[in-house]
Image (cartoon, rainbow, N blue to C red):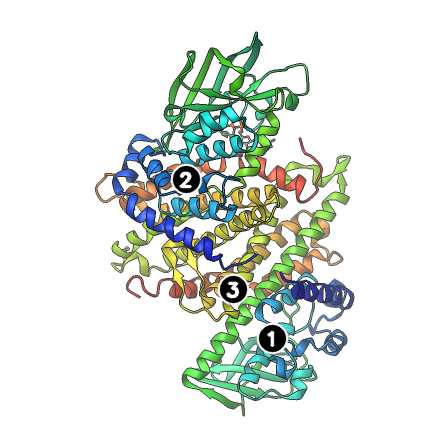
Amino acid sequence: MNADQEAIKDVFSSFFVEQTGPESARNSIPLGFDLKAWKRLSETGAPGMGVSPPAGGGASLSDLVIVAEEAGSQIAPLPIIDHVVTSRVLEKLDLLEEEVLTGTLIAGLVVRPVKNGVAKSVPTGAIANRLIALNEDKLLLLADEPPNKSLPNHGDLPIAHRVIKNADVIAEGREATELFDRALNEWKTLISAFLVGITRSSIEITVEYVKDRHQFGKPIGSFQSVQHGLADLPGLCDGARLLVNKAAWAGDKEIAGAINLTDNEISDFATLASMSLVFAGETSLHATDRGLHYHGGYGFSEEYDIQLFYRRARAWSQILNSPSEECLDLADLLLKDIGAE
Amino acid sequence: MDFELSEKAIDFRSQVKKFIENNLTSEIISNMHETGTFNDKSFNEALASEGLLAGAVPGYGDRDPVELYLLFNELEKAGAPYDGLAVTMLVAGIINAVGTEFHHEEILKKLLTGKHNCCLGYSEPDYGSDVASITTKAEKVGDKWIINGQKMWTTMAHESDWVLLLTRTNSEVPKHKGMTMFLVPMATPGIEIQPVPTMASERTNATFYDNVEVEDQWRLGEIDDGWSVMGIALALERGVMGGTNPAVPLLKHVLNWAETTPSKNESLMINNNLMRERIARTAIINQVGQLLTLRAAWIAATGGMPGVEGSMAKIYASEEYQKVVGWFQQMAGAEGLLSFGAEDAAAFGWIDYDARHAPVTTIYGGTSEINRNNIAERHLGLPRSR
Ligand SMILES: Cc1cc2nc3c(=O)[nH]c(=O)nc-3n(C[C@H](O)[C@H](O)[C@H](O)COP(=O)(O)OP(=O)(O)OC[C@H]3O[C@@H](n4cnc5c(N)ncnc54)[C@H](O)[C@@H]3O)c2cc1C
């Protein structure tokens, strides 16, 4: 991390700790969105940070990864990742509205293909005023009032189905798919960073808990089976962060096609973004699983925060794809030049 | 951490890659599996004459830990015999750090020619993880030391000119404070080597020390301060001298196999979805193993001591390797059981080999449990459990 990035980390770490955190996550159920915190965040200019410097942004993907991890560490119920990624697409097509730049209108990405005119289970579906979607080889922009009501769900996210009607075609053919793929890879990278944040906090919360909770006259954290269950996690968390950072680095450099599978030399952005999502996703599942378990019965109660992290890890790690499906897409990238595909 | 290697490091890596391409023959590889000795002196000598060996000594010369990592990583990925080399170069690093003029002249210089090897004599039949409790005794008699005892798992003893021997010199003090390290010439009378065959192709040894007499000049470090020398060894090794990318050569063999082998429905294995998922997962594991190791090297290169980070890389790489081997052995079914040389052996027997080798990787060099203790205490700040 360079000095600028240290500063980004400090600023956003304080912001998300002070303005969001488990408290805000709880208070925003069932919608899955904290409007007050979003307004505060908008005052800092964060919703526009991903666009180009002349438009008032200038953050690289590597910078955004830092923001996303801090957001994840506080399970912030804010659509910052979707908004930033979508704004970048809109700017490229010269369609960036002032209200989107400032965060007055929320923009989101339809991460999965549209089917029969409906975008199902859109991550920001309940709250997004602008949605970008890919329908076959057409990139669509839906400008519509959001339902402001989410489908009840595992991760308390602002998920909703959205009908894609009267949407503008904003790009076609190769341009459309390239823009969408780029946006989706950025989204994968940033969601992975969010998941690293979830993992990091789950470890911290659980380590504090096992130092504090006593059974048989000593802290449960002095039992070796508990220690060992936790000792696996920091390496996984750090590995996930390294992989996400590498993906962001490749994204900033727009590296495409650099895949040497048998030599383990991989710098292709799309490949690294996909790897990040699988690995950061499954790491967060594992860390929150151990974390909840070592809380004993309290981990299962609504009162303790670990269950919030547990459920959000599951939601974000599979809202795009099941990890197994994502691995199959990844295999297509890795084995492009190999075999009979 | 920078994902872009420095120009110097990139040049160094291409030099290593080129060296491997020109010098690592299939005879060398098959010879290592036939003999069980993962060391090849003529290969080591060739490395030396290419000027690559000085770069393999941790803390020595102008090679930084990232280059050290690159050298061993390339050797590991290529399936080269590097176990003996890694240990030998580690000892060279320890000599460089704490050795006397005599050790430099008499041992280090020779080690840098690639013609000589060292082995590590830490573990004993009764003390492995609890290595600070070892009982092999060194007694000062006049100006000589008399050594008696037995070591277990002295890998490469039969290839070596010296053994780095951890001995008990004082039983009156707490166990960590009564040990002394020696570099004992293997040719000294009273040393006996017995081979210990293993379930994989690699061989190790038991070594016996019966009134072995050495002069004081073979002592490495201070009397009763052998534990600090052990600490230096661990700090130098830092998890970057191989062992964190074992599934890379495995994946290469598996891919070759999957591209040429039909599955039950007649299509090639490479088109089987479960196979493809597992290949993708292995690719992720290999990347993460590489990144965790590179991070440890990078911390070392910038003046830090990546003890905990080395533990993280070691646990991750070895445990995932075992998982991956299990997947592919099962995918290969009955042919996944067939060994080198057997007709129809999956991946020419490599799957069977890796499945035999994998279990040891979570045991030697500090077991997973010992590494987890390290992380729990030193990283998570949990109370000592022992
Ligand atoms: C092929 C091979 C090559 C080797 N090469 C060398 C070599 O060159 N030089 C050398 O000196 N040694 C060498 N070793 C020895 C190796 O370092 C030891 O095997 C290792 O340290 C474990 O010791 P042990 O085998 O006595 O097992 P033990 O220490 O008896 O351990 C048995 C089990 O108990 C667990 N355990 C032990 N203590 C604890 C604890 N405190 N908490 C939780 N669990 C614990 C272990 O993790 C392990 O699963 C080699 C071993 C092998 C198999």
Observer-nearest residue: B26 or A69?
B26
Q: Nearer the viewer, mark 3 or mark 1?
A: 3
Between marks 2 and 3 in the image, the one whose residue lies nearer the viewer:
2
Report helix, strand or loop for mark 1.
Answer: helix
- Image position of A19 with respect to B268: above or below: below
> Which mark is first along the chain, 1 or 3?
1
Dots 3, 1 in contact, CB < 8 A = no
- Give left or right: position of B8 versus A60: left
B222 above or below A317? above
Secondary structure under tag 2 reads: loop
Q: Chain of mark 1?
A: A
- Nearer mark to the viewer, of 2 and 1: 2
- At horizontal 74% and vertical 48% (from top left) the residue drawn is A208
Which of the 4 image quarters holds residue A79? bottom right
> Residue visible at 57% across and 51% down?
A236
| Res. B28 in view | yes
- Quadrant in the rendering for residue A316: bottom right
Q: Are marks 2 and 1 on the same chain?
A: no
Q: Amino acid at mark 2?
A: Leu
The amino acid sitting under disc 1 is Asp
Residue B127 rendering spot, x and y as whole percentages: 55, 23
* Quarter of the image where the N terminus of chain A is located: bottom right
Q: Which residue is mark 3?
A: A247
Along the horizontal axis of the image, is A91 left or right of A218? left
Of the numbered discs in the image, which one, if any, rests on residue B53?
Answer: 2
Q: Secondary structure at mark 3?
A: helix
Q: Neighbour class for label 1 at 10 Å: few (<14), some, many (≥20)?
A: many
Give the chain letter at badge 2.
B
Discs 3 and 1 carry the same chain letter: yes
Which residue is disc 1 drawn over?
A82
